[in-house]
């Protein structure tokens, strides 16, 4: 009688290990592979892909105070504002119902990694995680802004926030948000923006970077003014 063949169990175990290692390598490579460069278009023509500008907003549409912030993810002053001031805005001012805050993309030409950062943030926004992602990228700005390929770092922040990484990778690879980001940037250019961050309060340029106490005063004064009853017409 011929002897039974040697057990194939060790082979299948080894094959499983290779498969798991290969999957992990693919995940790592997705972040480590240098992404295709993102080229900013001229703002003189029609919107890219016919997409209209739209930022990421938080707070009620009916809020009497509407603040729009144009920002660049490599901008040091933007990082300082977001890390020091935005947590209080989100925790203390937005819940009053008096303020609606809108972030508008304004990546600057001289910042090579900023376009990719804006795409990653917009893809995080698609999963309802823009504000945590914004904070993470600004808080760790010094760790990624000068890298030849910051994608792995940015994906790491997203993974730490519990985002669906498969969906995020597809969104970033396909550059899905880029036409909207370009539309936002071109809106800022047409407004004559010369730097970041730039703030508008109910459509009027603020002209300086506000501290939290400044924002409290702005919200209180503008909302109080909006609450005043309209003056009765003068009798003739």
Image (cartoon, grey):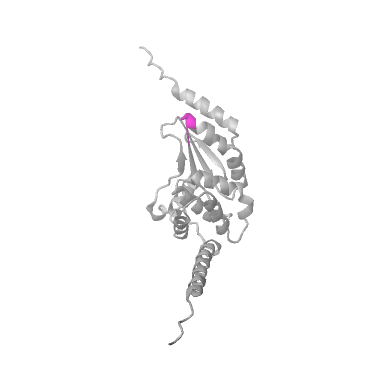
Look at the image and tell me in which quarter the C terminus lies: top left
Instruction: Specify the farthest residue to the top.
Output: 236
Look at the image and tell me in which quarter the N terminus lies: bottom left
Task: Please name the residue shown 52% across and 26% down the image.
Answer: 220
Task: Please name the residue shown 44% across and 31% down the image.
Answer: 63
Task: Please name the residue shown 52% across and 25% down the image.
Answer: 221
Instruction: Specify the farthest residue to the front.
Output: 1
Could you say where residue 82 lies in the image, as x and y percent from the top left? Answer: 58, 41
Could you say where residue 228 lies in the image, as x and y percent from the top left? Answer: 44, 20
The count of marks equals 0
Q: Does 7 appear above or below 58?
A: below
Q: Does 164 appear above or below 69?
A: below
Could you say where residue 100 lies in the image, as x and y percent from the top left? Answer: 47, 35
Q: Which residues are magenta?
A: 95-100
Confirm whether the magenta stretch covers residue 96.
Answer: yes
Q: Does 178 appear above or below 236?
A: below
Confirm whether the magenta stretch covers residue 217.
Answer: no
Is residue 156 visible from the viewing direction of this image? yes
Is residue 36 visible from the viewing direction of this image? no
Could you say where residue 167 lies in the image, as x and y percent from the top left? Answer: 44, 56
Instruction: Specify the farthest residue to the bottom.
Output: 1
């Amino acid at each position: 009688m011929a002897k039974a063949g040697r057990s194939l169990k060790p082979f299948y175990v080894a094959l499983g290990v290779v498969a798991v290692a290969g999957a992990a390598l693919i995940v790592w490579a997705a972040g480590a592979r240098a992404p295709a460069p993102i080229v900013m278009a001229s703002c003189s023509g029609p919107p890219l892909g016919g997409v209209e500008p739209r930022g990421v907003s938080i707070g009620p549409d009916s809020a009497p105070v509407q603040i729009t912030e144009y920002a660049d993810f490599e901008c040091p002053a933007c990082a300082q504002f977001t890390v020091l001031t935005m947590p209080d805005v989100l925790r203390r001012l937005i819940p009053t119902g008096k303020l609606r805050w809108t972030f508008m993309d304004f990546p600057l030409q001289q910042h090579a990694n900023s376009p990719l950062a804006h795409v990653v943030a917009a893809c995080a926004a698609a999963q309802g995680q823009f504000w945590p992602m914004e904070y993470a990228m600004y808080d760790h700005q010094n760790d990624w802004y000068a890298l030849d390929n910051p994608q792995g770092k940015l994906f790491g922040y997203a993974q730490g926030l519990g985002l669906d990484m498969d969906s995020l990778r597809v969104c970033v690879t396909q550059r899905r948000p880029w036409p909207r980001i370009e539309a936002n940037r071109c809106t800022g250019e047409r407004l004559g923006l010369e730097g970041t961050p730039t703030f508008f309060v109910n459509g009027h340029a603020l002209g300086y970077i506000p501290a939290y106490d400044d924002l409290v005063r702005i919200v209180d004064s503008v909302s109080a003014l909006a609450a005043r009853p309209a003056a009765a017409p003068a009798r003739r």
